[in-house]
Amino acid sequence: MEQINNIQVVPCTSSNYLKPFRVLYSQNGTKKSWDFMRTHDSVSVLIFNTTSHCFILVKQFRPAVYMCEWEKNHPTPAEEKGSEAATVPEEEEEKGVAENHDHLPPASAGVTYELCAGIVDKPHLSLEEIARQEVLEECGYDVPVTKLRRITSYRSGVGVTGAKQTMFYLEVSDENCVGEGGGEPQEGELIEVIKVPLQEAMNFAYDENIPKTMGVIFSFIWFHNNMSPKYKISTNV
Protein backbone atom coordinates (compact mmCIF):
# COMPACT_ATOMS: atom_id res chain seq x y z
CA MET A 1 0.00 0.00 0.00
CA GLU A 2 2.93 2.32 0.69
CA GLN A 3 4.62 1.97 -2.71
CA ILE A 4 3.04 4.17 -5.36
CA ASN A 5 4.92 4.82 -8.59
CA ASN A 6 4.64 4.96 -12.40
CA ILE A 7 1.77 7.45 -12.13
CA GLN A 8 0.22 8.78 -15.33
CA VAL A 9 -2.91 10.89 -15.66
CA VAL A 10 -4.78 10.16 -18.89
CA PRO A 11 -8.23 11.06 -20.28
CA CYS A 12 -11.09 8.87 -19.07
CA THR A 13 -12.97 7.98 -22.23
CA SER A 14 -15.26 5.40 -20.62
CA SER A 15 -15.92 4.05 -17.14
CA ASN A 16 -18.12 1.50 -15.42
CA TYR A 17 -18.36 3.78 -12.39
CA LEU A 18 -18.52 7.41 -13.53
CA LYS A 19 -20.31 9.11 -16.41
CA PRO A 20 -20.02 12.92 -16.82
CA PHE A 21 -22.99 14.97 -18.02
CA ARG A 22 -24.06 18.58 -18.35
CA VAL A 23 -27.66 19.45 -17.53
CA LEU A 24 -29.26 22.56 -19.03
CA TYR A 25 -32.27 24.01 -17.24
CA SER A 26 -34.15 27.16 -16.31
CA GLN A 27 -34.67 28.26 -12.71
CA ASN A 28 -37.03 31.14 -12.02
CA GLY A 29 -36.65 32.27 -15.62
CA THR A 30 -32.84 32.17 -15.62
CA LYS A 31 -31.08 29.73 -17.93
CA LYS A 32 -28.46 27.66 -16.14
CA SER A 33 -26.15 24.72 -16.67
CA TRP A 34 -24.47 22.32 -14.28
CA ASP A 35 -21.88 19.60 -14.78
CA PHE A 36 -22.45 16.44 -12.80
CA MET A 37 -21.29 12.87 -12.58
CA ARG A 38 -23.65 9.91 -12.64
CA THR A 39 -22.40 7.18 -10.35
CA HIS A 40 -23.61 4.30 -8.19
CA ASP A 41 -25.34 4.62 -4.86
CA SER A 42 -23.50 2.95 -2.00
CA VAL A 43 -23.74 1.38 1.44
CA SER A 44 -21.51 1.79 4.47
CA VAL A 45 -21.35 -0.10 7.76
CA LEU A 46 -20.27 1.01 11.21
CA ILE A 47 -18.92 -2.23 12.71
CA PHE A 48 -18.53 -2.60 16.48
CA ASN A 49 -16.78 -5.64 17.92
CA THR A 50 -18.46 -6.47 21.23
CA THR A 51 -15.67 -8.83 22.25
CA SER A 52 -12.87 -6.26 22.18
CA HIS A 53 -15.05 -3.12 22.37
CA CYS A 54 -13.54 -1.57 19.28
CA PHE A 55 -14.70 -0.25 15.93
CA ILE A 56 -13.63 -2.01 12.75
CA LEU A 57 -12.56 0.40 10.02
CA VAL A 58 -10.77 -0.04 6.72
CA LYS A 59 -7.67 1.79 5.55
CA GLN A 60 -6.89 2.12 1.87
CA PHE A 61 -5.15 4.19 -0.76
CA ARG A 62 -7.44 6.59 -2.63
CA PRO A 63 -6.00 7.92 -5.91
CA ALA A 64 -8.33 10.94 -5.94
CA VAL A 65 -7.09 12.02 -2.51
CA TYR A 66 -3.50 11.41 -3.54
CA MET A 67 -3.79 13.51 -6.70
CA CYS A 68 -5.38 16.37 -4.75
CA GLU A 69 -2.31 16.36 -2.49
CA TRP A 70 0.00 16.11 -5.49
CA GLU A 71 -1.56 19.08 -7.24
CA LYS A 72 -1.23 21.27 -4.14
CA ASN A 73 2.51 21.36 -4.77
CA HIS A 74 2.46 21.56 -8.56
CA PRO A 75 1.40 24.68 -10.48
CA THR A 76 0.85 22.61 -13.63
CA PRO A 77 -2.15 20.22 -13.46
CA ALA A 78 -1.21 16.56 -13.55
CA GLU A 79 -3.19 15.90 -16.73
CA GLU A 80 -0.98 18.42 -18.55
CA LYS A 81 2.27 16.94 -17.23
CA GLY A 82 1.24 13.36 -18.00
CA SER A 83 4.05 10.90 -17.44
CA GLU A 84 6.33 13.69 -16.20
CA ALA A 85 5.00 12.87 -12.72
CA ALA A 86 8.09 10.73 -12.34
CA THR A 87 8.69 7.92 -9.90
CA VAL A 88 10.22 8.83 -6.56
CA PRO A 89 13.64 7.19 -6.18
CA GLU A 90 13.51 4.13 -3.94
CA GLU A 91 15.70 5.70 -1.27
CA GLU A 92 13.32 8.66 -1.01
CA GLU A 93 10.26 6.39 -0.85
CA GLU A 94 11.83 4.88 2.25
CA LYS A 95 12.17 8.35 3.78
CA GLY A 96 8.48 8.95 3.09
CA VAL A 97 9.06 12.51 1.86
CA ALA A 98 9.44 14.28 -1.46
CA GLU A 99 12.25 16.84 -1.31
CA ASN A 100 11.16 18.99 -4.26
CA HIS A 101 8.20 19.61 -6.53
CA ASP A 102 9.44 17.23 -9.21
CA HIS A 103 8.91 14.28 -6.90
CA LEU A 104 5.76 12.53 -5.86
CA PRO A 105 4.34 12.87 -2.35
CA PRO A 106 4.54 9.76 -0.17
CA ALA A 107 1.83 7.17 -0.68
CA SER A 108 0.51 7.97 2.80
CA ALA A 109 -0.81 11.26 1.38
CA GLY A 110 -3.55 9.27 -0.35
CA VAL A 111 -4.39 6.83 2.45
CA THR A 112 -7.69 7.31 4.31
CA TYR A 113 -9.59 5.64 7.14
CA GLU A 114 -13.15 4.72 6.23
CA LEU A 115 -16.18 2.69 7.16
CA CYS A 116 -16.55 -0.65 5.44
CA ALA A 117 -18.47 0.27 2.29
CA GLY A 118 -19.32 -0.66 -1.27
CA ILE A 119 -21.26 0.44 -4.31
CA VAL A 120 -24.80 -0.70 -5.05
CA ASP A 121 -24.35 -2.50 -8.36
CA LYS A 122 -26.23 -5.77 -7.83
CA PRO A 123 -29.93 -5.19 -8.57
CA HIS A 124 -30.87 -8.68 -7.38
CA LEU A 125 -29.57 -8.00 -3.86
CA SER A 126 -31.05 -5.83 -1.12
CA LEU A 127 -28.98 -3.07 0.46
CA GLU A 128 -28.59 -5.25 3.54
CA GLU A 129 -27.30 -8.17 1.48
CA ILE A 130 -24.79 -5.94 -0.29
CA ALA A 131 -23.64 -4.55 3.06
CA ARG A 132 -23.25 -8.07 4.45
CA GLN A 133 -21.07 -9.05 1.49
CA GLU A 134 -18.86 -6.01 1.96
CA VAL A 135 -18.37 -6.79 5.65
CA LEU A 136 -17.26 -10.31 4.77
CA GLU A 137 -14.98 -9.30 1.88
CA GLU A 138 -13.37 -6.24 3.44
CA CYS A 139 -13.29 -7.10 7.14
CA GLY A 140 -13.66 -10.90 7.36
CA TYR A 141 -16.80 -11.06 9.52
CA ASP A 142 -19.62 -13.38 8.49
CA VAL A 143 -22.99 -12.28 9.89
CA PRO A 144 -26.64 -12.69 8.88
CA VAL A 145 -28.39 -9.71 7.32
CA THR A 146 -30.80 -9.65 10.26
CA LYS A 147 -28.03 -8.23 12.45
CA LEU A 148 -27.72 -5.10 10.31
CA ARG A 149 -29.46 -2.03 11.72
CA ARG A 150 -30.17 0.82 9.34
CA ILE A 151 -28.95 4.15 10.71
CA THR A 152 -29.94 6.52 7.90
CA SER A 153 -29.33 7.45 4.28
CA TYR A 154 -28.01 10.71 2.88
CA ARG A 155 -26.80 12.35 -0.31
CA SER A 156 -23.05 12.56 -0.76
CA GLY A 157 -21.16 14.80 -3.18
CA VAL A 158 -24.29 16.85 -3.89
CA GLY A 159 -22.38 19.30 -6.06
CA VAL A 160 -20.92 16.61 -8.30
CA THR A 161 -22.69 13.26 -8.01
CA GLY A 162 -25.75 13.47 -5.76
CA ALA A 163 -25.46 9.74 -5.08
CA LYS A 164 -27.18 8.24 -2.04
CA GLN A 165 -25.34 6.33 0.65
CA THR A 166 -27.19 4.16 3.15
CA MET A 167 -25.43 3.60 6.48
CA PHE A 168 -25.88 0.55 8.69
CA TYR A 169 -24.75 -0.41 12.18
CA LEU A 170 -23.53 -3.92 12.89
CA GLU A 171 -22.37 -5.63 16.07
CA VAL A 172 -19.94 -8.51 15.63
CA SER A 173 -17.87 -10.67 17.95
CA ASP A 174 -14.60 -12.49 17.52
CA GLU A 175 -16.65 -15.63 16.85
CA ASN A 176 -17.98 -14.02 13.66
CA CYS A 177 -14.47 -13.52 12.27
CA VAL A 178 -13.87 -16.10 9.53
CA GLY A 179 -11.03 -14.45 7.63
CA GLU A 180 -8.59 -11.55 7.42
CA GLY A 181 -10.68 -9.44 5.05
CA GLY A 182 -8.73 -7.11 2.82
CA GLY A 183 -11.17 -6.92 -0.09
CA GLU A 184 -11.15 -8.72 -3.42
CA PRO A 185 -7.65 -8.75 -4.99
CA GLN A 186 -9.10 -9.64 -8.40
CA GLU A 187 -10.99 -6.33 -8.25
CA GLY A 188 -7.82 -4.45 -7.43
CA GLU A 189 -8.72 -3.90 -3.78
CA LEU A 190 -5.93 -3.56 -1.24
CA ILE A 191 -7.53 -2.93 2.13
CA GLU A 192 -6.12 -2.99 5.66
CA VAL A 193 -8.48 -3.72 8.55
CA ILE A 194 -8.05 -1.26 11.44
CA LYS A 195 -9.35 -1.46 15.02
CA VAL A 196 -10.19 1.73 16.92
CA PRO A 197 -10.84 1.20 20.67
CA LEU A 198 -14.15 2.62 21.85
CA GLN A 199 -12.43 4.80 24.45
CA GLU A 200 -10.38 6.48 21.72
CA ALA A 201 -13.16 6.85 19.15
CA MET A 202 -14.08 10.49 19.56
CA ASN A 203 -10.48 11.65 19.78
CA PHE A 204 -9.90 9.69 16.58
CA ALA A 205 -12.93 11.29 14.92
CA TYR A 206 -11.84 14.86 15.64
CA ASP A 207 -8.11 14.44 15.06
CA GLU A 208 -7.48 16.39 11.86
CA ASN A 209 -4.12 14.68 11.42
CA ILE A 210 -5.91 11.39 10.76
CA PRO A 211 -7.35 11.40 7.22
CA LYS A 212 -10.84 9.99 7.32
CA THR A 213 -14.26 10.21 5.67
CA MET A 214 -17.20 12.15 7.03
CA GLY A 215 -18.96 8.81 7.49
CA VAL A 216 -16.48 7.84 10.20
CA ILE A 217 -17.03 11.07 12.13
CA PHE A 218 -20.81 10.98 11.81
CA SER A 219 -21.13 7.30 12.74
CA PHE A 220 -18.91 7.66 15.82
CA ILE A 221 -21.07 10.56 17.00
CA TRP A 222 -24.19 8.47 16.31
CA PHE A 223 -22.78 5.62 18.38
CA HIS A 224 -21.93 7.96 21.24
CA ASN A 225 -25.46 9.35 21.28
CA ASN A 226 -27.32 6.09 20.79
CA MET A 227 -25.24 3.09 21.85
CA SER A 228 -22.50 4.02 24.32
CA PRO A 229 -24.87 4.06 27.35
CA LYS A 230 -25.54 0.38 26.62
CA TYR A 231 -21.88 -0.46 27.13
CA LYS A 232 -21.32 2.01 29.98
CA ILE A 233 -17.97 2.98 28.54
CA SER A 234 -16.83 6.56 28.09
CA THR A 235 -16.12 7.64 24.54
CA ASN A 236 -13.98 10.54 25.78
CA VAL A 237 -16.23 13.35 24.64
Image: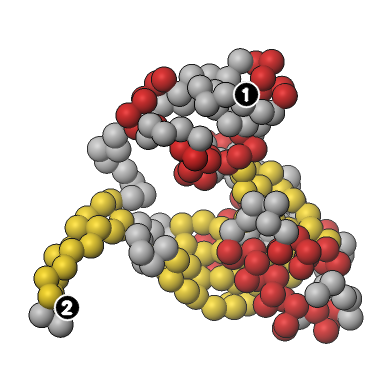
Residue 61 shown left or right of residue 147 in the figure: left
Residue 116 shown left or right of residue 200 in the figure: left
Residue 232 shown left or right of residue 204 in the figure: right
Number of marks: 2
Q: Is residue 175 visible?
A: no
**Which residue position is annotated with label 2?**
27
* Amino acid tagged 2: Gln
> From the viewer's perspective, is the residue at label 1 or at label 2 nearer?
1
Q: Secondary structure at mark 2?
A: strand
How many residues crowd around disc 1 within 10 Å: few (fewer than 14), some, or many (20 or more)?
few
> Could you say where residue 217 lies in the image, as x and y percent from the top left?
65, 67
**Which residue position is annotated with label 1?**
99
Residue 5 shown left or right of residue 40 in the figure: right
* Amino acid tagged 1: Glu
Above or below, 131 against 234 in this view is: above
Q: Earlier in the sequence, mark 1 or mark 2?
A: 2
State the residue at coordinates (45%, 66%).
156
State the residue at coordinates (53%, 19%).
87
